[in-house]
């Protein structure tokens, strides 16, 4: 049985942050040489343990909510599954909302199943901490298709659509966001989390859950464009990745090798296109 997580199916509606995502704390606010006490809204950060077939697989610090989607997205981007059909069931542990149990289909557990090496804790600020070798995150990646052609104004519109679904960020300023779109720029999923990689995994997990993985053609991120973010999006078959910050050299190298259009410094009216610019028309 596949169950919804605490965030609920409507957690990307843009209305209000999920109740478990924020708390109010007392703080001293210093402004212009004066200080006063005030209540502030802060983003909750808690650990989430993901088990695969009852074996501990992954422990991350995350913002509570959309945990099922986070687990599914992680399993896809790490190569544990290749589609939602590989999942027998996924649900929260009966005894803890901070644990998600993933059970693979008998076919995925067979002799040809990929090895699972991920273990240890990975903190929200880094998506690859705990990896023994850089090559461990290099799962088999196919070269991108050439089905997408967009105007740059459409990319700006997608960025605005992502920003419209960041209720926790606007309440706290403490989260990253990731959104997935089809080839026409229509929103398929949008998620946020204290970890940039978690936000992308949640969005990927949502489109898998809704059987729309094949429709995802573009990703927009609120974070820098790092190697693992390109790798995660490439696992889904995305052709265009855009972010508000800078790419790393490895991200550019990987995007170029996979023929993915990589756009950085996405700001109102301006952007840098680093690889495969042929998909984008500057209007």
Image: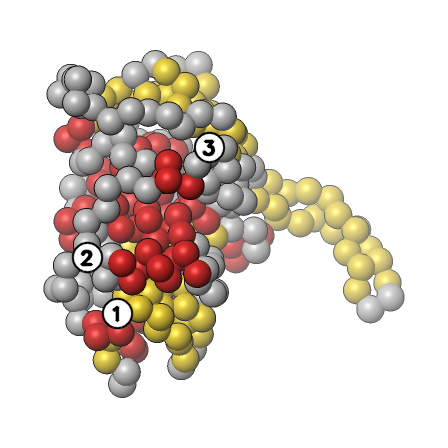
How many labels were placed on the picture?
Answer: 3
Of marks 2 and 3, the one in the foreground:
3
Q: Residue at x 34, y 53 (%)?
A: 230
Q: Residue furthest right?
A: 33
Q: Earlier in the sequence, mark 2 or mark 3?
A: 3
Q: Is residue 26 above or below residue 154?
A: above
Disc assigned to residue 144: 2
Disc assigned to residue 276: 1
CB contact under 8 Å: marks 3 and 1: no
Disc assigned to residue 132: 3
Of marks 3 and 1, the one in the foreground:
3
Q: Secondary structure at mark 2?
A: loop
In the image: residue 98, left or right of residue 151: right
Q: Is residue 248 above or below residue 57?
A: below
Q: Residue at x 17, y 22 (%)?
A: 112
Q: Say which of 72 and 226 sits in front.
A: 226
In the image: residue 27, left or right of residue 56: right
Q: Residue at x 13, y 21 (%)?
A: 107
Q: Earlier in the sequence, mark 2 or mark 1?
A: 2
Q: Residue at x 20, y 35 (%)?
A: 82
């Amino acid at each position: 049985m596949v169950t919804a997580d605490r965030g609920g199916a409507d957690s990307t509606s843009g209305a209000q942050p999920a109740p478990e995502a924020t708390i109010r704390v007392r703080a001293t606010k210093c402004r212009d040489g004066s200080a006063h006490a005030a209540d502030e809204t802060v983003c909750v950060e808690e650990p989430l343990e993901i088990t695969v077939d009852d074996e501990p697989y992954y422990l991350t610090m995350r913002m509570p909510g959309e945990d099922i989607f986070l687990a599914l997205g992680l399993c896809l981007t790490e190569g544990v599954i290749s589609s939602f059909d590989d999942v027998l069931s996924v649900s929260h542990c009966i005894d803890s909302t901070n644990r998600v149990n993933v059970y693979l289909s008998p076919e995925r557990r067979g002799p040809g199943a990929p090895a699972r090496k991920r273990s240890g804790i990975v903190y929200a600020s880094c998506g690859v901490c705990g990896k023994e070798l850089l090559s461990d995150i290099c799962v088999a990646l196919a070269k991108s298709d050439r089905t997408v052609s967009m105007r740059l104004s459409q990319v700006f519109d997608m960025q605005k659509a992502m920003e419209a679904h960041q209720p926790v960020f606007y309440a706290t300023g403490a989260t990253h966001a990731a959104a997935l779109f089809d080839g026409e720029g229509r929103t398929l999923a949008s998620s946020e989390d204290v970890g940039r990689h978690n936000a992308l995994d949640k969005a990927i997990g949502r489109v898998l859950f809704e059987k729309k993985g094949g429709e995802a053609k573009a990703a927009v991120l609120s974070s820098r464009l790092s190697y693992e973010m390109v790798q995660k999006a490439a696992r889904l078959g995305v052709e265009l990745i855009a972010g508000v910050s800078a790419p790393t050299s490895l991200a550019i190298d990987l995007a170029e090798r996979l023929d993915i259009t990589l756009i950085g410094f996405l700001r109102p009216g301006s952007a840098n296109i680093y690889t495969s610019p042929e998909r984008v028309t500057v209007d």
